Image (cartoon, rainbow, N blue to C red):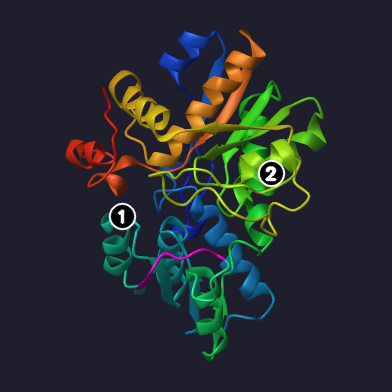
Amino acid sequence: MDIKRGFANAVGNTPLIRLNSFSDETGCEILGKAEFLNPGGSVKDRAALYIVEDAEEKGLLKPGGTVVEGTAGNTGIGLAHICNAKGYKCLIIIPETQSQEKIEMLRTLGAEVRTVPAVPYKDPNNYVKLSGRIAAEMENAIWANQFENLANRQAHYETTAAEIWSQTDGAIDGWVAATGTGGTYAGVSMFLKAKNPTIRCVVADPMGSGLYSYVKTGDIKIEGSSITEGIGNSRITGNMEGAPIDDAIQIDDREAVRVIYQLMEKDGLFMGGSVGINVGAAVALAKQMGAGHTIVTVLCDGGGRYQSKLFNRDWLASKGLSPD
């Protein structure tokens, strides 16, 4: 009998899905790691599990304790699920700009949610810094600190990357993913490069993020903005330090929206906004490399968490965007 023992044991082992419409267009095998099929609905379930279990193993989190985190949503949702399954409390600090669906889901799961203004990381009231200060003032609490906590990228080194390598029988030519904390990109890149140094590892970046500029020029410069949530950065996080990067591809919102709607209408996949950046960059990489290559990216989460924005034509129009 193949039975998973609770929520934590059900995290991971997601399938790779061939993105037929984009694969057929490019002549490459473009594969998406179906992280939306994790029990909490996103790739962040892996980091949430590893962060909590790492704190348990180190004796930092005692029974009845609280996990505090500043998050754009999905890590918080993963942490809320894990905390419920393990008997901890969960306190989430989230920018008020994030989708109402994610904020409401966190509250439904029983997390205490505090919304705060969205300000740059350099501001002391940035949601990440604020969550750290709050955790430090509480008893029997830990700060998940997903951006700097290396348990994050370790989760992807040990599980996500190992699964991708096994599922492709090592026949992979390119890996491309956007970064927020950097955990997914870095963990997978470090594993794949150790297995085969010729695999191209490429950062996908939205407008409004400085990572594309950093890879191309060595300086972090930010231009434009993006409707995507939870990805992009204006700094190099602890999880991204030392991660191998061969190149970066920047995808604007117009292309991301086009990709998201093509995935829904031609591939039957109802995906979140960051998937548009990931798959858009995978398509661009496929065109660079030429036909016959296998490229893997991440299907981070489903579209239901963004329905009031990304799948609302009036809202898109207010941003100068259209799926058509």
Q: Position of residue 207 (x, y in %)?
A: 49, 40
Mark toward the start of the polypeptide (1 vs 2): 1
Q: Residue at x 80, y 33 (%)?
A: 195
Which amino acid is tagged 1? Ser
Residue marked by disc 2: 214
Q: Residue at x 31, y 55 (%)?
A: 99
Query: Is 305 situated above or below 59?
Result: above
Q: Residue at x 32, y 57 (%)?
A: 102
**Secondary structure beneath disc 1?**
loop
In this picture, which residue range is highlighted in magenta? Answer: 115-121
Q: Position of residue 242 (x, y in %)?
A: 78, 50
Residue 170 in sight: yes
Residue situated in front as seen by the camera: 123 or 57: 123
Q: Is residue 281 magenta?
A: no
Residue situated in front as seen by the camera: 59 or 156: 156
In-image side of 102 versus 173 (left or right): left
Which amino acid is tagged 2? Tyr
Q: Residue at x 26, y 22 (%)?
A: 324
Residue marked by disc 1: 99
Residue situated in front as seen by the camera: 195 or 176: 176
